Structure formats: C-alpha cells, structure tokens
Image: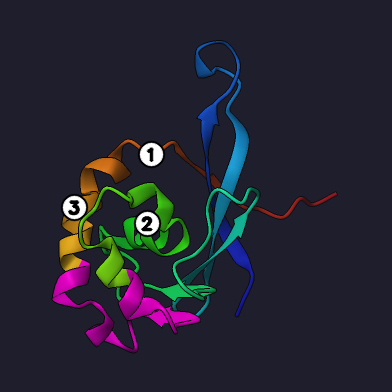
Amino acid sequence: MAGYTTVYTFGQAGGFRGCDGVNEIEFMLLEGTAGRMWFCAKHFTNKYSPMGKVEVFIPQDPYDVFVLLDACLLFAPQLFQACPTLEIAKKQMSTKKRVDFDAEPELVTPEWRMLRSEASDIYKKLPLWRADLQQLKL
C-alpha cells in the first residue's frame, strides 16, 4: 500500500463551544490512494474495534457516497449497535482481513445495503473530522 493522504478522526469538539477542534480522539480512519483508494484504522481506546479481523477496506468507487459510512461500519461497528442487520453483516465479514468492494463487489450484499440504510441516521450525527496531509518542507 502507498502512503496516507487524508485522516478522519472520531472525537468530540473541544474547548468552549467546540472552538478548539477535536478533543479526545477515539479512533482514526487513515485514507490512502495509489491505484485505488483504501482505508485502515487506528484505535486509541478499547471502546471501538474493527468488524471481525478487518485491517483494510477498499471501496468499490472512491466517489461513492457510502465510502466513509462503510469505513465506519467496518472499523467501528460498535457505533451502530442499534441496527438490526449489524449482526448479519458481522457474520458475513467475520473472516475478512481485507474487505475489497472493488475486486469483490459481491461483498456488497443485500444485507450490507440494508445495514447502510439502517446506519444512515446514526452516521450523519457522528463527530467526524477530516485533515488532508501535506509534507512540510523544512
């Protein structure tokens, strides 16, 4: 895999009325791009862990509206415990270390599409932050 280009953090706004940026980061989604977009995650607490053995996620299309939702579902399914289809999706992904929706579009099952629908309202309220990475020229 190539290097990372973007970082998405999950954490609450810090300071007075959130004016100090993100505080107490619980996990990060690290996005890389080479021939294809891919994600991995870094968890800072035991509160969140990936679905099954997932280490890498490659979306079917980098411009798909579900890219970040899919990454959150795979790397922090605990956020979506209220979704009835979550347990089915966990079983389907239980042995996967690399979830590649591009090379294996059959992984986007009817159950996964249902889970996306169930998780949508939760996802829209998540405290996600984005930072584009640029190398400093010192």
Report the amino acid beneath label 3.
Glu
Q: Which residues are magenta?
A: 90-112
Structural distance between the alpha carbons of marks 2 and 3: 15 Å
Magenta-drawn stretch contains 54: no
**Measured from the top left, where is residue 15 in percent x and y?**
60, 16
Which label belongs to residue 126? Answer: 1
Task: From the viewer's side, name the closer residue of 76 and 82.
Answer: 82
Which amino acid, by three-letter code, is at mark 2?
Leu
69 in relation to 79, above or below: below
Q: Quadrant of the N terminus?
A: bottom right
* Applied colour scheme: rainbow
The label shown at residue 118 is: 3
- Which is more toward the observer, 73 or 18? 73
Specify which label sits upstream in the sequence, 2 or 3.
Answer: 2
Q: Viewed as shown, does residue 126 lie left or right of 54?
A: left
Residue 35 is at least partly visible in this image:
no
